[in-house]
Amino acid sequence: MNKKVLGIIGGGQLGMFICIAARKIGVKTVIYSNEEHFSAKKFCDHYFVGNTGDEIKINKFIDSADFFTIETENIPKEFLRKIENQKKLFPSSKIIEIAQNRLKEKKFLNNIIGIETTPYFEINNFEELKTYSKEFEYNCILKTQELGYDGKGQYVIKNSNLEKFKNLNLTNLILEKRINFQLEISVIVIGNLIKKIHYPPVENHHKDSILRQTIFPANISEKISKKAIKMALKISRSLKLEGVLAVEMFVTKDNKILINELAPRPHNSGHWTMDSSEFSQFDNLVSLIIKNEVRVPNVFKKCKMINIIGKDYLKFKAIEEKFIAYDYYKEQVRLNRKMGHYIDFE
Ligand code: ADP
Ligand code: MG
């Protein structure tokens, strides 16, 4: 039995799966959730419900665990730094702060030799939006620099809808060229400065900017696969990663790899690792944090991970009869909300 306690900021499905992995090896968990009802509730040992500015609760949370990790990058810097002043946070606040701001993230990535993101411009007013959307031939996406996820805070910009943005407060945004990609893939790396493991690239299919399906293995050449892994490891090294990093990428029609974004936490495109590898992304994250160990995942079976989104959840019982299925125990079914997922081995 291990007496170390792991603190997790956020109690959604990612937090829930971290708790389940921790419990398997006797590690206790404590969640800090900003919602009364949260997925991880029945799998953690202790929890605090509070907002991210509640000093008293945050202090108690910090006192209650030895190590800390996150399940979302959208956490105020003050909260992260407060933890880091006293205890160890995986990954570091520096990495989380890069990944929580698209502009910082893109600048960081493009500074690494051999790494390239989608072309972009910083936008702070309508004039800039007008100028740069023209430069991108009106084929572009406007994104908030912070707080976006599952396509939230994103707007496709065309010549025909440009004027609609005229009277809006357009600050702290970026405009990205819309990439007519061949495929979206992702690579997950877990480790520290000395040892790292990675999961093979998987193929990701989105609809309305929300991940619907992840396919392992990705339908890409050996050459692209090796290149994607090399890039993910290079980014992890540049960040001095201690923890988990998911790297989302676009494979362009001419077989170039552009980095879309980084997630310094377990990733939806890695859920398949719970059923098709010996050590899932959650197992390896907990093992790294608590035991300073990572294990080669030994992936064994091709599969598809399919998200259960919004009203699809009403069919959960029927899905569960046919497939390995995971319920995220959300209180309410909401449009475009991730409610669960299942694994299809075909
Ligand atoms: P988030 O996952 O934080 O919502 P992303 O930037 O990853 O934000 O966007 C979500 C999805 O929208 C991507 O996975 C991709 O399918 C699509 N998308 C985002 N940016 C672009 C782009 N520049 N070109 C083409 N598709 C994009
Ligand atoms: Mg994304």
Image: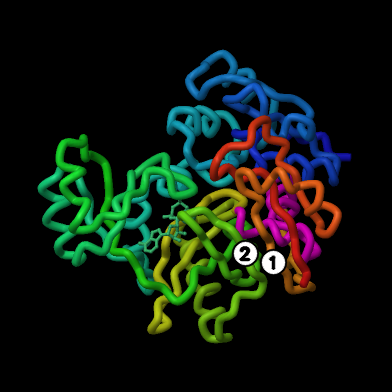
- For image coordinates 65% across by 75% down, the residue present is 217
* Of residues 222 and 193, the one drawn nearer to the viewer in this rendering: 222
- For image coordinates 75% across by 53% down, the residue present is 283
What segment is highlighted magenta in the picture?
268-292
- For image coordinates 38% across by 84% down, the residue present is 254
Which numbered disc, 2 or 1, marks the residue that appears first in the sequence?
2
In the image, residue 288 lies in the stretch drawn in magenta: yes
The residue indicated by pointer 1 is 304
- Secondary structure under tag 2 reads strand
Height in image: 66 above or below 230? above
- Quadrant of the snapshot with the N terminus: top right
The residue indicated by pointer 2 is 214
User: In the rendered image, which quarter is residue 156 located in?
Assistant: bottom left
- Quadrant of the snapshot with the C terminus: bottom right
Residue 81 visible to an observer of this rendering: yes
**Residue 83 picture location, percent across and down:** 55, 30
Residue placed furthest toward the top: 56
- For image coordinates 50% across by 79% down, the residue present is 227
